[in-house]
Amino acid sequence: MKEKEENLKNENTLQKEKKDKKDKTSKEKKAKKEKQPKEKKNKKKDKETSKFVQKIKKNWIIDGTKTCILILLIIAVFVAITFGMHNLDLTPLDFTQDKLYTLTDESKERVKDIDKDVNIYFVNYSDDDSDLSLAKQYKSANERITAEAVDADSRPDLAEKYGIESGSSGIIVECGDRSKVLTSSDLVTYDSTTYETISIAEEKLTSAILSVTTDDIPKVYFLEGYSDFTLDYNMYYFSVYLQNEIMEVDTLNILSTGNVPEDCDTLVITSPSKDFDDVTKTAIIDYINRGGNILWLNAAMSNTMDLPNVNEVLALYGVNPFEVGIIRETDSSRMVSGSPDLIFPNLGYSDITEDIYSDGVIFVNATKVNINEDGLEELNVTETDLATTSESAYFRTNFENSTTSAAEGEETGSFVVGAELEKTITEANEETGESAVTSTLIIYGENYFISDYQLAENSQYPAVQLAYNKDLALNSLAYLSDREEDITARKSTGTVTYTATEQQDTVVRVIIFAVPVVIILIGLIVWQKRRRKK
């Protein structure tokens, strides 16, 4: 019995051990089961961390380095292109109405045949100066003309030779032993009405280049002592433009000199307000008889003047005395803003007017030039009309009459307001080989058209008047001085405005808008392709 109880006890113990072992195994399985997700989770986390690190290495370090290298390459290419373009001295794009920053074809034509070395030094100027950029463009017309910016410290010889003080600037145009020095103020002029700064840089530079390379420079004298129109008074702005021409300009008082100097190529006479003295009359006639040329500008007369000596000089060319009165237009297309006293004369096509034929000029209170047509042959004079009015013009003699049409007795029709009269002094002699001696008079029944006189207060034309008219007067001087190469339409400068042509406007818009859009689209396409590969 005892043995039986003990067997039962052992059996229970064995069962308990089995149960405990089973429970332990179950707990271990359970613990192991619980441990597995944590290990998987940790492994997954480690894997994700590894991917992140690889991504950083690839995208931030490797790709970033590539990007930096690409950026540096782009910058290097840009710098190389910029440096190359700078060295090529290419003409800049210029969309200003009057091409203020581009050398005109006229200037290129005038310097292209120069066979001497010309150096233009911009002392103490920066390399990006607009006037220097303009000067460098002469090289495209003639390889022998160069322009550069120099420092006074590096070229003390220039500063000392031409008197350029420390801290100041100057422009030296040099050809061999001949030179001309300009200052920055020489390259601009000012309109006292509009307070506008007007650039005359191209005219000044071209004039300086030609003056140091031209052997024969004509001399022009303005007769003084008989007129209210002088270079210092009433024609100051015109005198500024004269300085840009290839000619020496001076004033002449014949009562002091007793004659017209031998070196006078052209004598300018402006609106005599009193008669010539006998000495002056005789000196001018002697000048004509030796083949001298005259530019005569005569404003309209408001009262009768006794000018026998003046009229005697004019009569040599078949010009009758001027009459009291002014020309008025009734053709609206030949007047300025409904003002019959401000006329657009018809320009005859000649060497003087061919380059300005389409632009025209504005005459203010013009008078008619009375030419004795019947007496020209006897005087050995040939006439060429340079400027005339329309057939609907009339000659106002009664200034108290304010009507805009001709009054009874007032002359109507087309009037000559500008003419060229060539007088043959002696015929050519084939036996002796002597050439003909001729004297040419260019005469305009106007003087205000190149004066400082403004058309009208608050008018849209006040600053335009001289800009339009200067070419007619300057071309007349060039023609009389036997410098046909200087007959041209000069650059009119002023306010810079964007006035691109349709083609230019299209190019600019493509550059501004289309090019950036194309670059963005290419970038998106490349990005999409790379994304798909991943």
Image (cartoon, rainbow, N blue to C red):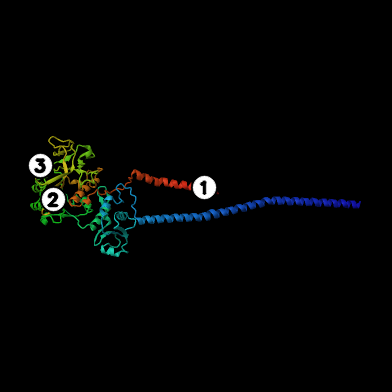
Q: Is residue 301 above or below residue 188?
A: above
- Residue 404, image x and y in percent? 18, 36
Say if 434 sits above or below 321 in the image. below
Q: CA distance from mark 2 to mark 1?
A: 85 Å
Residue type at tag 2? Thr
Residue type, label 1:
Lys
Q: How many marks?
A: 3
Residue 382 is drawn in which quadrant? top left
- Which is more toward the observer, 311 or 373? 373
Q: Nearer the viewer, residue 500 or 290?
A: 290
**Where does label 3 land, which residue?**
374
| Residue situated in front as seen by the camera: 419 or 381 | 381
Q: Secondary structure at mark 2?
A: strand
| Residue wearing tag 2 | 438
Residue closest to the eye, 79 or 176:
176
User: CA–CA distance between discs 1 and 3?
Assistant: 92 Å
Other residues around mark 3 within 10 Å, as few (<14) / some (14–19) / many (≥20) = few
Q: Which mark is residue 529?
A: 1
Say which of marks 2 and 1 sits in front. 2
Q: Quote the CA–CA distance across marks 3 and 2.
A: 20 Å
Is residue 69 visible in the rendered image? The answer is: yes
Q: Residues within 10 Å of mark 2 (few under 14, many from 20)?
A: many
